[in-house]
Image: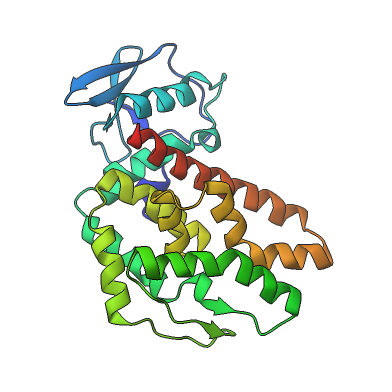
Amino acid sequence: MTDHEKASMAPEGLKDKPSHAKRFYEQVTTKDEGGGQSSLLLDGKPVRTPGKALFVLPSHALAEAIAEEWRGQGTRIDPATMPLTKLANSVIDGVAGREAAVVDDILSYAGSDLLCYRGEGPKGLVALQTKHWDPIVAWAKQDLGAPMRLAEGVIHIGQSQASLDALKQRLINFDRWSLGPLHVMTGLAGSALLGLAVALQRLSPEEAWSAAHVDEDWQISKWGEDEEARHRRGRRWRDFAAAARMLGLLRG
């Protein structure tokens, strides 16, 4: 992910602010830009991304949700509580004009998708993988026209070009605003199939997140959970859920 994708948003004419910078605005409003688009205003001033592009959203619903993130800040700005803002920045600065590259990156996950690598044991883990993953693999074959090859262990197994081409045909129908959240979900889950399942409303975000963590949850059930790992997973879930929420807001 680029530096722009990781940065927090700055208003027009101001330098980028460090994390937890002092709040520099009072009022947050949205402005109808026509064509279904809306922009964000801080004290009446237009906002730009870290890459200095105009911060214009494709729907009023998304603009209002992002405005609420800004309204909810206290005396200092905490970017960690603004996942929709961060994601919108990444779409404008990192996805626009690079849609083909983003599609290719999602396909690279499909080529070694988490759901295609199964444990050789123990039986309990294998049963959980089968329960959570087989329905999505079947869905990919039946609904997406992309049968996936499965393997035991970690030895790489290549997917057929026909399956990857079928997935690509689905992906090229996503615009930049849908590709951005899908790319985030894919990376966080380690699975293009799970990302697509949420984007195409085959799974809820919670179901996909659980499926992505079958192996980890199995280990936790046996050995307990590390506190730092728990917090890290919580932060990742926040970003995953925000990406799914953005897709929902785009659908209206």
Q: Quadrant of residue 143?
A: bottom left
**Can see residue 148?**
yes
Q: Nearer the viewer, residue 140 or 23?
A: 140
Above or below 208: residue 146: below
Q: Position of residue 185 (x, y in %)?
A: 46, 53
Q: Is residue 135 left or right of residue 31?
A: right
Residue placed furthest toward the left: 35
Above or below 251: residue 155: below
Q: Nearer the viewer, residue 152 or 45?
A: 152
Q: Residue at x 68, y 73 (%)?
A: 127
Above or below 149: residue 217: above
Residue placed furthest toward the front: 142
**Can see residue 8?**
no
Q: Nearer the viewer, residue 212 or 75?
A: 212
Q: Residue at x 38, y 67 (%)?
A: 142
Q: Quadrant of residue 214?
A: bottom right
Q: Residue at x 40, y 85 (%)?
A: 158
Residue placed furthest toward the right: 223
Q: Is residue 62 left or right of residue 198?
A: left
Q: Position of residue 198 (x, y in %)?
A: 45, 51
Q: Is residue 72 left or right of residue 121?
A: left
* Quadrant of the rendering where the C terminus is positioned: top left
Q: Position of residue 114 (x, y in %)?
A: 52, 71
Look at the image and name its color scheme: rainbow
Above or below 132: residue 58: above
Q: Position of residue 178 (x, y in %)?
A: 32, 46
